[in-house]
Amino acid sequence: MRRLQSLIDVTRYVRGFRLEKSGIVPLCVTDEKQAVSRLINAAGIQVLVARPELSQDGNSDTYTESISTAFFIIEKSLGADRTDIREDGQFETLADVADEVLTKLERDAGNFDNPYLKRLSLAVVEVVPEYNIFGGWNGYSVEVTFR
């Protein structure tokens, strides 16, 4: 197996990632600047996925690796229409979509029918609420690590 094969596989997986229930097709981005430019004319709930990163420990004969990425489940800030109740509702709706993302990741990781994640397991998950990111979007970042 090539040294970066797992990175290539996870990158292919996130590029083809789709949410069946909500019908959302995520945008793949590399950094915040690209995210802002991709969201400039967007509306509604958006899911962005960061291009995966690889970390390897050890030499070329024996090494361990982990691959990390983040999904951003976001919606435009409520602006002048913001109330505590509306904002709480927005975050609750976005948490439902974040749960859909995690359910799909858990189902696909380690599944031998999935050519990209069949050798990997979902090792670490961190869900963080986000406010006013990417130029005015609220929601959650879902950071995941595969090993």
Image: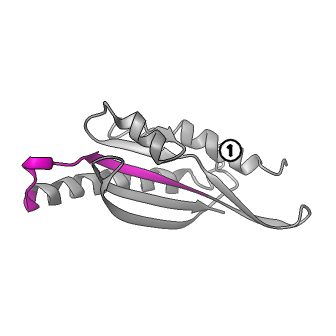
Horizontal relation, residue 112 to residue 82: left or right:
right
Visible residue check, residue 24: no
Residue range of the region highlighted in magenta in the rendering = 68-85
In the image, residue 71 lies at what x, y percent? 45, 51
- Graded by Cα atoms within 10 Å as few (under 14), some (14 to 19) or many (20 or more), the crowding at tag 1 reads some
Q: Verify whether residue 6 appears in magenta.
A: no
In the image, residue 20 lies at what x, y percent? 39, 38
In the image, residue 96 lies at what x, y percent? 29, 54
Pick the residue in front: 82 or 26.
82
Work out whether 135 lies above or below 60. above
Horizontal relation, residue 5 to residue 86: left or right:
right
Pick the residue in front: 25 or 107.
25
Q: Verify whether residue 73 appears in magenta.
A: yes
| Quarter of the image that includes the C terminus | bottom right
Pick the residue in front: 87 or 24.
87
* Residue holding disc 1: 9
Residue at 21%, 49% (x, y): give it: 77
Residue at 66%, 49% (x, y): give it: 112
Instruction: Using the rendered view, name the quadrant where residue 46 is placed.
Output: top left
